[in-house]
């Protein structure tokens, strides 16, 4: 294809390459100019088409903001900021407050982070610093595979495997030894905040560990060698030479995982119990912002009900954007060679 | 005195070695703990899925509650339809935006688009569902496959854009310059030389986006909505495999639970097959292009 285009071009035709003939063939000139302007047009059209695609991305984000803000107006006018500080969610009497959903989202996501970050960092440390060379690729491939499983399949697995496991073995154990904290009190249903936190943790481990891995590889080899030369053991090298330098990036990975956890819908909806309550115990059922939209949006009767759900969506959107941008900046601060201001 | 100091030294070094060993064990333990759920998920998926998978499942529509048998054929077809719509809408825009970022965007404006693509990538899928509901379902006044396709297309765009940009930037400038030097116009160079060179990377990006949306359920809940019958009309509510899995999984019926597992297995297998099929086809195309 490319060859034909080249051959047709006047500059490469053999007649023009020979000096004297150049002046003796003026009639060719207008024709070639037409051709040139034709390809210029094509160039311009192509450029504008690509620009349009680029602008579509911009347009989509604006569209999301527009749709969410206009459709949520009704709820904003009716409840204002109070909306996020009230717990009663009563479609029958048209009273809507999102506090219990906000609470559920935050608690389940933080719980997931608490479980996922140590494990993910452990995996990243093992893969980049400890594992034998031949094991590296298969290990990182398998952990990445965890990210490829659809959310609904995690939910399915959680309902039939994880929840019974929690109910039968983990929760009674937690209640016996840590029941005094009040966090693990009440009847062990299996379904509830704890199950949501665990399944979320499994789902966000791959993203956190792959970011951590990326940041750790960005730490210069000399750092490791310098620490080792001082007589450090491998762990001391990892702690002082690698983890300390990669701290900001690991934090960024964690926050990126938080962003995923906040917006995760299906698996959480399937195991959290879907009850709009705020309970201290992690065994108790809860409800998240994403779950309430998933469960009630298509059945919402009445404009105020729908508008309240959109308002929940808007809050979720804004929070995830802030979280993601923050995470991105932190990761960039390590991988782009900007000195991270984290050395204590 | 000297022996005492030596002993203290030894104790310190023993402690340090002990900590080193512990850290290795802890990291190894973390790997095992992370791989455990992966194996458990796949193990259960294959074990429970194969047990409930049969010919009827792949060829019949759902039976009413209480009747044995039936399948998810219409949901599989619905998923194909929705994914087709999403790919037709999302892939060209994503690749185009990627080309724009890599080949044309200069300075601030390019950064803004790059940044918005990253933002779009992080938007929760359920929120995108709300938007698709607003722009398609409310206009049409009913749920439809088209609305589901639009929602998934929006999710595809940013992933493809960033992957395309990254792959195009890997193509050396000299390749472009060689084409310009031969008098090839810019658009021609971009399409037949630069994009051609980066094909396999771009396709990987597209397939990543595809795999990601193929299992998406949340945005389909109130766009495609689901349907217990066959439907090939893009303007009608349509069943989708992930939706059907969700509905069956949270139902109280054992028969439906079995079908949910079978559906999950089919979903994973379909994703793997479509991803590898496209990669193999693209690999062949690439060979032809270079020879």
Image (cartoon, coloured by chain):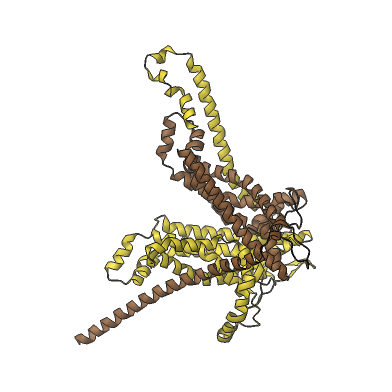
Quadrant including the N terminus of chain B: bottom left
**Which residue sits furthest top?**
A24
Seen at 71% across and 71% down, the residue is B254
Position of B285 relative to A295 (above/below): above
Q: In this view, does B25 lie to the left or right of B251?
A: left
The foreground one among B129 and B48 is B48
Q: Chain B appears in which tint?
A: brown
Number of labels in the image equals: 0
Question: Residue A246's image quarter?
Answer: bottom left
Question: Residue A46's image quarter?
Answer: top right
**Which residue sits furthest left?**
B2
Position of A313 relative to A168 (above/below): above
Quadrant including the C terminus of chain B: top left
Position of B193 relative to A60 (above/below): above
Seen at 66% across and 68% down, the residue is A270
The location of residue B189, given as percent across then percent down, is 48, 35
The location of residue B263, given as percent across then percent down, is 66, 61
Q: Is residue A317 visible?
A: no
Q: Is residue A27 visible?
A: yes
Question: Residue B129's image quarter?
Answer: bottom right
The foreground one among A189 and B278 is B278
Q: Chain A appears in which tint?
A: yellow
**Which residue sits furthest front?**
B55
Position of B27 relative to A264 (above/below): below
The location of residue B277, given as percent across then percent down, is 56, 50
The location of residue A140, given as percent across then percent down, is 46, 62
The foreground one among A242 and B112 is A242
């Amino acid at each position: 294809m490319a060859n034909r285009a080249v051959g047709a071009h006047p500059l490469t035709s053999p007649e023009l390459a020979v000096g004297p003939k150049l002046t003796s063939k003026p009639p060719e000139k207008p024709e070639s100019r037409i051709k040139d302007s034709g390809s210029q047009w094509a160039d311009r059209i192509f450029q504008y088409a690509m620009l349009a695609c680029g602008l579509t991305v911009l347009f989509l984000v604006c569209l999301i903001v527009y749709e969410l803000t206009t459709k949520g107006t009704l709820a904003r006018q009716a409840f204002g900021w109070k909306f996020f500080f009230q717990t009663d969610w009563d479609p029958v009497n048209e009273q809507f407050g999102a506090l219990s959903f906000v609470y559920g989202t935050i608690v389940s996501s933080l719980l997931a982070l608490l479980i996922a970050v140590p494990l993910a960092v452990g995996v990243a440390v093992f893969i980049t610093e400890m594992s034998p060379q031949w094991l590296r690729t298969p290990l990182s491939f398998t952990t990445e595979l965890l990210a490829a499983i659809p959310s609904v399949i995690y939910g399915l697995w959680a309902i039939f495997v994880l929840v019974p496991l929690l109910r039968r073995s983990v929760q009674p154990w937690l209640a016996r030894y840590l029941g005094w904290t009040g966090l693990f009190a009440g009847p062990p249903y299996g379904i509830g905040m704890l199950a949501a936190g665990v399944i979320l943790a499994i789902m966000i481990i791959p993203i956190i560990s792959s970011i951590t891995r990326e940041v750790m590889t960005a730490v210069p080899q000399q750092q490791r060698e310098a620490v080792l030369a001082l007589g450090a053991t491998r762990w001391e090298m990892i702690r002082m030479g690698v983890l300390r330098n990669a701290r900001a990036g690991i934090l960024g990975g964690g926050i990126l995982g938080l962003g995923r956890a906040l917006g995760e819908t299906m698996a959480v909806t399937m195991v959290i119990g879907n009850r709009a309550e705020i309970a201290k115990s992690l065994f108790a059922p809860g409800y998240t912002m994403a779950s309430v939209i998933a469960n009630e949006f298509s059945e919402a009767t009445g404009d105020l009900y729908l508008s309240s759900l959109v308002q929940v969506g808007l809050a979720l959107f804004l929070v995830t954007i802030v979280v993601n941008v923050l995470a991105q900046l932190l990761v960039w601060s390590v991988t782009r060679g900007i000195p991270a201001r984290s050395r204590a | 005195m000297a022996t005492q100091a030596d002993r203290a030294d030894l104790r310190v070094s023993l402690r340090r070695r002990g900590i080193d060993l512990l850290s290795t064990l802890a990291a190894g333990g973390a790997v095992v703990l992370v791989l455990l759920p992966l194996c458990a998920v796949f193990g259960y998926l294959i074990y429970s899925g194969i047990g409930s998978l049969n010919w009827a499942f792949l060829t019949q529509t759902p039976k009413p509650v209480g009747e044995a048998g039936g399948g998810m054929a219409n949901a599989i077809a619905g998923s194909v339809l929705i994914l087709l719509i999403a790919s037709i809408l999302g892939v060209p825009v994503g690749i185009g935006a990627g080309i724009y970022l890599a080949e044309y965007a200069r300075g601030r404006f390019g950064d803004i688009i790059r940044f918005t693509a990253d933002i779009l990538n992080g938007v929760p899928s359920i929120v995108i569902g709300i938007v698709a509901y607003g722009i398609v379902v409310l206009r049409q006044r009913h749920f439809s496959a088209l609305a589901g396709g639009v929602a998934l297309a929006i999710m595809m765009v940013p992933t493809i854009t960033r992957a395309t940009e990254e792959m195009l930037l890997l193509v050396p400038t000299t390749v472009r310059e060689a084409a310009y030097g031969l008098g090839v116009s810019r658009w021609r160079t971009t399409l037949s030389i630069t994009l051609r060179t980066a094909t396999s990377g771009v396709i990987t990006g597209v397939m990543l986006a595809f795999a990601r949306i193929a299992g998406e359920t949340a945005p389909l809940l109130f766009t495609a909505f689901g349907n217990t019958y066959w439907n090939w009309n893009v303007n009608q509510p349509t069943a989708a495999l992930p939706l059907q899995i969700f509905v069956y999984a949270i139902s109280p019926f054992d028969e439906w639970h079995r079908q949910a597992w079978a559906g999950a297995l089919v979903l994973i297998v379909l994703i793997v097959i479509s991803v590898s099929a496209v990669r193999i086809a693209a690999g062949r195309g690439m060979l032809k292009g270079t020879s």
